[in-house]
Amino acid sequence: MLEVKALTSFYGDFQALFGIDLAVGENEVVSLIGSNGAGKTTSMRTITGLLHCDANMVLWKGQPIGHLRPDQIAKQGIAMVPEGRQLFPSLSVEENLRIGAQVNRPGFWNLVRVYELFPVLGERRNQASTTLSGGQQQMVAIGRALMANPEIILFDEISLGLAPIIINQIYEALPNIIDNGLSALIVEQDIARALKIAHRCYCLSEGKITLSGGTDVITQDDVSQAYFGV
Amino acid sequence: MVWVNSILQGVLLGGLYALFAAGLSLIFGIMRLVNIAHGDLIVLAAFLGLVVTSSLDIHPLASLVVVVPAMALLGYLLQYLLLNRTMSDDILPPLLVTFGLSVILQNVMLETFSADPQKMNTGALDTASITVGALHIGVLPLLMFAVAIAVIAGLQWLFYHTAIGRAFRATSDNADIAQLMGLNKKHVFSLAMALSLAVVAIAGIFLGTKTSFDPSSGPARLIFGFEAVIIGGLGNLWGTLFGGIILGVAQGIGAQIHPGLQQLAGHLVFLILLAIRPNGLFPRVAH
Amino acid sequence: MLVTRNSRSSNAFIVFVGVTLLVLCTAPLWAGRADLRFLSEVFLYLGLAYLWNLLAGYAGLVSVGQQAYVGFGGYLLFALAINVGVTPLALLPVVGVAGVLIAIPVAALMFRLHGAYFAIGTWVVAEVFRLTAAQITSLGGGSGTSLPVSVVKSIASSRSGRESLSYWAALAILVFVIALVFWFLRSRSGLALTAIRDNELAAESLGISVWRTKFVVYILTAGLTSILGALIFLQKLRISPDAAFSVNDWTAFVIFIVVIGGIGTLEGPIIGTLLYFLLRETLADLGTAYLVILGATAIVIMLFAPKGIWGFIKERFGIELFPMTRRVVKKQSVQTQNTQTLKGENRD
């Protein structure tokens, strides 16, 4: 459904990605593993249109979308839960969720369903989003992405900076979310979790894919080896 | 009684300054843009009002029906075609481009309308006044003040109770992530400038009915608006009203002491407040 | 390995500058009166452009209120010359020091504002200066005053002697300004400035006091701008608040010069000034249209070549006239061989 083909990316003179190929199928969960600076966030930002690339480097349902603006890509059904949550501080919890629905895509998810998924958000709907704990903020970020009724969600560093108990809660909620007919591309530093949640995984090192395959065949050792780029 | 009167006139004049300031504050709040041509656009709106008033033979205040949408459209196009190209972390390009725009506007107006001072005649409104005790309050300044309050209340409502206001705030917080919510940054910025120039249109018409204006009047209006914004506290719309009032009262008292001191008194109060309250009197509380 | 700032183009430029300076010094011998006046004006504008470029292009202090110091310098010179009776040229250092002193409280206040708000804040200060000058009745109030004949005569008895002297003064102050800016940018503080411009946060973490460096640049610029202002009105022999504190004459045109020539480059102001006077001499008859063209040119340059004409040339051809960038010159010396061996060892 989502295909990335020979994706290259530059920050000024610095090349961050050297011809990345990856694909996410329908109802498929794919994880992207790599150390800091490997190019994970760059990949995510390019897919969502925040960084520029050639039209044919990113395909959505077979159509080139690499040249589109971020808002146009969002309207196609690609949502992101960005690294570090990045909620809107001047918006309340509910406003943060409502703005996710700005793309006008009808579907399963609405305010009521998000509050059912994360009841604590319903209790705090009128609070400023900055008053929430890190885990609750992550719930808002996930809820905000769901409100767009996307067909795929990109999770960037889903557990970074969260307490282990919160990470467990988020990972428990994840299957419920994905079972509603979603695909997901998850960036995760925790190799064990990344292999457990996903159907397939890619390892990214220094801007190149160094390993890819089904999580049923790839072992943690394979990943470690690819991770450290030996 | 003379003093009470000049203070009162100052307060009412503060409404006009708040109108100058609101448009400036708005675009700074949403996109960190300071429009050096803001004052010249106010004067442009006044000239536009003059043209509409005389060619359609209508009351100056009725010309708002034409001037407000016209200025809003100009604002949208200005942002979309020109200023959006200058938006980055570097403050220099927007500053210098709007500075160039200011020089262009002044000289195009000079060429079109000549350097003669103009004023719009509001007929009976010009002289109508309410007498309270020994005070005579002009109906026009009173109307101007009421409109300023209404405009600020309207902007406040728009910001906090509508989808477009939510989009403005989200874009202001984090333009990148706002785009992921399906908001086209360029369109949102252009709408913000359209809104700013709609307020500029109202400010321009009231400027033109209250005092005489000429193509070089712009920079002073920019400075008054800017002073009101800083006195009130950046990003606080109601603060700009208080900032405008303080500026108006300072000018009124200055003028009462000596006619040459009107503007100087306003500037000095601004500088003193900047020294003792650098974040303004009513800084927006960070969430 | 040899590190140098000089390049072939910059060496040739230094020779060129030397010859040009010599020719310009002798101008009173061969140039007509109108030419001398014109050249002086060019020098003074070039000086203003260099100072604004240092302020905005290097220190990131985008001021639109430099007319405050032009007018201050002019007014102070007139006040002192009329009341104290010292010959005006001897007063220039006093004007410079006074400019620095008055800029200290201004900077302390204005530095509370950032970015574009700093810009408008400096404009307010210039307005305060203008309105204050208009209140000084002994200097003619709002309509201004002329320099008394006795004062004018005290510069030099003959008209041509006077004009030569103010020409040389303008040239000398220009050379001083350029040399100072050049020296400053190559000094430790100058390198700190470049670091600030490139990344304020990083500069701060390196222990460079951003505030202090900017402060020094601001007051230094103010002092020199005051001296330039004093010379400008010494040539005009007449001063008024509107002329002395004109935002168009002393800031807008200067900004256009720097932007068109290339902001943040040392060569830009020269190109910009030459182009500005070329445009002015050819298009001035157009009146307002000329100013519209000037404004539009600055906008187009800012949008499509934000580093100006010189930035464009530099990027395209790699030429640098003022030796600023350090470059490594490959030279077969013992040291180079040593480094190469070291690298070789590392590779093994």
Image (spheres, coloured by chain):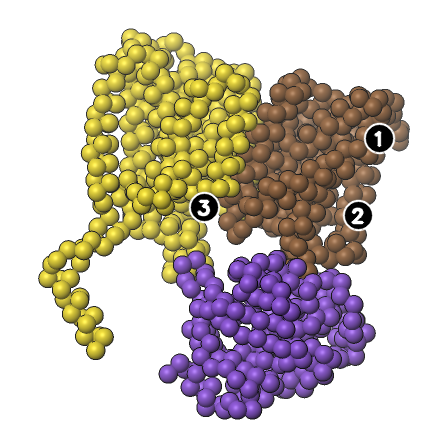
Chain colours: A purple, B brown, C yellow
Residue that mark 2 sits on: B153
Mark 3: few, some, or many residues within 10 Å (few <14, many ≥20)? many
Camera-side residue of C186 and C23: C23
In this rendering, the label closer to the viewer, 2 or 1: 1
Q: Are marks 2 and 3 on the same chain?
A: no
Q: Residue at x 21, y 42 (%)?
A: C8
Asked if one can make out residue A135 in the rendered structure from this viewpoint, the answer is: no
Tag 3's secondary structure?
loop
Dot 2: element: helix
Numbered circles on residues, count: 3
Residue drawn at x 56%, y 80% is: A31
Q: State left or right for residue C320 relative to residue C247.
A: left
* Residue located farthest toward the front when viewing the structure as drawn: A62
Same chain, labels 2 and 1: yes
Query: For the residue marked with disc 3, what is the amino acid?
Result: Gly
Apparent side of residue A80 relative to residue B128 in the rendered image (left or right): left
In space, the residues marked 2 and 3 are separated at their CA atoms by 37 Å
Q: Which residue bears the numbered disc 1?
A: B62
The chain ID associated with circle 2 is B
Question: In the rendered image, which quarter is residue A206 located in?
Answer: bottom left
Report x, y in % for residue B118. 72, 20
Dot 1 surroundings within 10 Å: few (below 14), some, or many (20 or more)? some
- Report the Cα–Cα distance between label 1 and label 3: 45 Å
Chain for mark 3?
Answer: C
